[in-house]
Image (tube, rainbow, N blue to C red):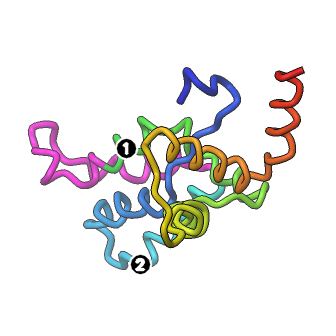
């Protein structure tokens, strides 16, 4: 993606996926639900460093296998993806921080068009149709065709 989009793209870790790591790391918390809500609030405020600091006293020894080290695994996951945790910025722009809607978009972006009764697609044409449907869903339809017209002229 970086080769294709360069600095035009911003990446955001799926907030709910990160929550899976946090939930596993909450093993030392007496009230797991409250602990989770507090960490999620910090993350939504881009205060991920504070989350890391709060995890540090509970890090498992280095010789513990990852499967048995949920706190260390969560700490590493957050630390390695710190440049993809701008939830505050995404929320300020009314962007989604989870992938649920994106993951279900195939139903209304792709399947509505590609599963028309009697339709038959070659892989080459399928890829082109998918690209056009994505352009349309991203509200770039007019810009796309204007650019095609400029290239043809």
Most foreground residue, 123 or 147:
123
Other residues around mark 2 within 10 Å, as few (<14) / some (14–19) / many (≥20): few
Dominant secondary structure (helix, strand or loop) of the stretch shown in magenta: helix
Does 107 appear in magenta? Answer: no
Residue 33 is labelled as 2
- Residue at image x 70%, y 56%? 137
First of labels 1, 2 by sequence position: 2
Rendered residue at 15%/42% (across/down): 61
Q: Residues within 10 Å of mark 1 (few under 14, many from 20)?
A: some
Residue occupying image coordinates x 64% and y 50%: 134
Q: Marks 1 and 2, Cα distance to the nearest angstrom?
A: 20 Å
Horizontal arrangement in the rendering, residue 127 relative to residue 24 (left or right): right
Residue 65 lies left or right of residue 139; in this view the side is left
> Relative to residue 70, is residue 125 depicted above or below?
above
Quarter that holds the C terminus: top right
Highlighted range, magenta = 46-73
Q: State the mark number for residue 15.
A: none
Between disc 1 and disc 2, the foreground one is 1
Q: Residue furthest front?
A: 118
**Are the residues flagged by discs 1 and 2 in contact, CB closer than 8 Å?**
no
Query: Would you name the residue on which mark 1 appears?
Result: 77
User: Residue 43 is drawn in which quadrant?
Assistant: bottom right
- Residue 10 x %, y %: 64, 37
Q: Is residue 26 left or right of residue 148?
A: left
């Amino acid at each position: 993606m970086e080769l294709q989009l360069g600095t035009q793209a911003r990446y955001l870790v799926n907030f709910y996926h990160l929550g899976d790591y946090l939930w596993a790391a909450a093993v030392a918390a007496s009230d797991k639900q409250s602990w989770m809500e507090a960490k999620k609030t910090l993350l939504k405020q881009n205060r991920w460093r504070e989350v890391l600091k709060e995890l540090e006293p509970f890090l498992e020894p280095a010789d513990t296998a990852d499967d048995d080290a949920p706190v260390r695994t969560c700490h590493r996951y957050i630390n390695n993806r710190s440049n993809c945790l701008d939830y505050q910025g995404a929320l300020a722009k009314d962007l989604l921080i989870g992938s649920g809607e994106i993951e279900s978009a195939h139903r209304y972006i792709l399947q509505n068009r590609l599963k028309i009764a009697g339709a038959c697609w070659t892989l080459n044409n399928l890829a082109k149709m998918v690209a056009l449907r994505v352009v349309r869903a991203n509200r770039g339809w007019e810009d796309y065709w204007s650019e095609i017209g400029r290239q043809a002229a």
